[in-house]
Amino acid sequence: MRIEPDLDQGKLLELLRDRYLLDAAGLTFVPYGLDSWSYVAACGDGSRRFVKLSRHEASAPSEITLLAALAARRVAVPRPVADRDGAFLNAVDGYEAQVLEYLEGGDLEAETEWPDDLYAQVVDMVAAVHESTNAVRHLVERVERYDLPFLPSLALTLTSIVDRADQPLGDDPTLVTLRDMVRPQADELRVAIGRLETLRDRAVACDSDEVLCHTDIWGSNLLRSPDGTLHLLDWDGALLGPREHDLFMFAGTVFFPAERFGWFLDRYEAACGRVRLDAETFGFYFYRRTLDDLASFVGSIVEGRMEAMRPGAMLGVVADLLAEVPRLESRISTVSRVLVKPRARTTAPRSRPIERLRVAPRRGIGRRP
């Protein structure tokens, strides 16, 4: 769970009153997320607003403009709130702040069983995002470059905590536990790094069509309102990229069982038309997501950067990610079979409980926009 920032709440309340003309009476911290901090602001008239803070400029003005454009197109996203001058970003006490409409409901992170109608809503939402590309393309600055900036640090970390096992780790039980977890899979991780680099080269050569991608569609970023409406939260990572960047989350991750992927594609193509997809591009995203998360969590533990989560929780995430690595090739094979046998994609299998994975949201706050 996220730890509350060192923030003068009085300054934040003053910002809301002065810049946003809100009668903000109090703030409630939302303890979720990794790269940002969030509050719900209660106003004197009984309304609420969602306030998101970051230490860096996590959401450029163009990204917030994109969110406003999607909301105007009736894509179910949180609508940004402009200040008195029409701006969406402000600075307060060393943080970048943005204000969004407050959405009633809860996220789907803790869901253990997904009925077919809920799956269908998610498919329709993904299709709506991708189909909005032409209307909002001019607002999207980032384009997928297939970068792997985390690989050098991951390789260095493997060397420092595994190959240099003779170096003392002091009395830090977290580092000792981390080394004991990573060491048995060190060779497998190096093979996975090489495999990712190969898949990157093939994905670049594939020259896929580019659509608007959210890049982090999973339970924590899906909010269900009391009337059943789903909203897609946390758009900090939006970019133009291949459809696979969003679709891989539904092709056999713990978020969405592999046996439902064919049904997912049938419904998705009913909305978007037949699309060209590549199994190895899916593989690139399977590997990149897993190894990127692993590099982030392992690096944070080694460097003592654990303000976002408790050490035990971070070690739990590392354990889940290490267990995921041996499964990645089978996930690629499953995707390949589905793509070459479209006629086998007919009905939605019965819903079943979903295995829990303790991976935190990659960016944003997780529970609210």
Image (spheres, rainbow, N blue to C red):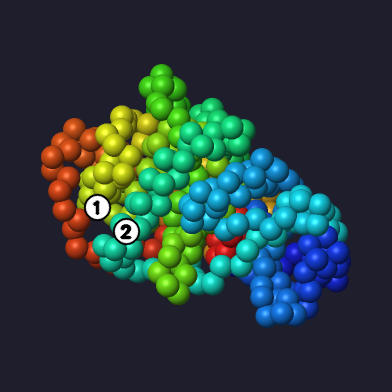
Q: Secondary structure at mark 1?
A: helix
Asked whether disc 1 touches disc 2, contact meaning CB atoms under 8 Å apart, the reply is yes
- Disc 1 marks which residue? 260
Residue located beneath label 2 in the image: 119
Under mark 1, the amino acid is: Arg
Residue drawn where x is 13% and y is 43% of the image: 344
Residue 291 appears anywhere in the view? no
Residue 129's quadrant in the figure?
top left
Query: Is residue 45 among the parts visible in the rendering?
Result: yes
Mark 1 / mark 2, whichever is N-terminal = 2
Q: Residue at x 58, y 46 (%)?
A: 69
Mark 2 residue type = Tyr
Residues packed near mark 1 inside 10 Å, few (<14), some (14 to 19) or many (20 plus):
many
On the image, which quarter does residue 19 sit in? bottom right
Pinpoint residue 65: horizontal percent, then vertical percent.
64, 45
Left or right: where 271 falls relative to 73: left
Name the spot of residue 13 as percent of width and height, x first: 81, 70
Q: Secondary structure at mark 2?
A: helix
Which percent across, then down, holds residue 25?
78, 78
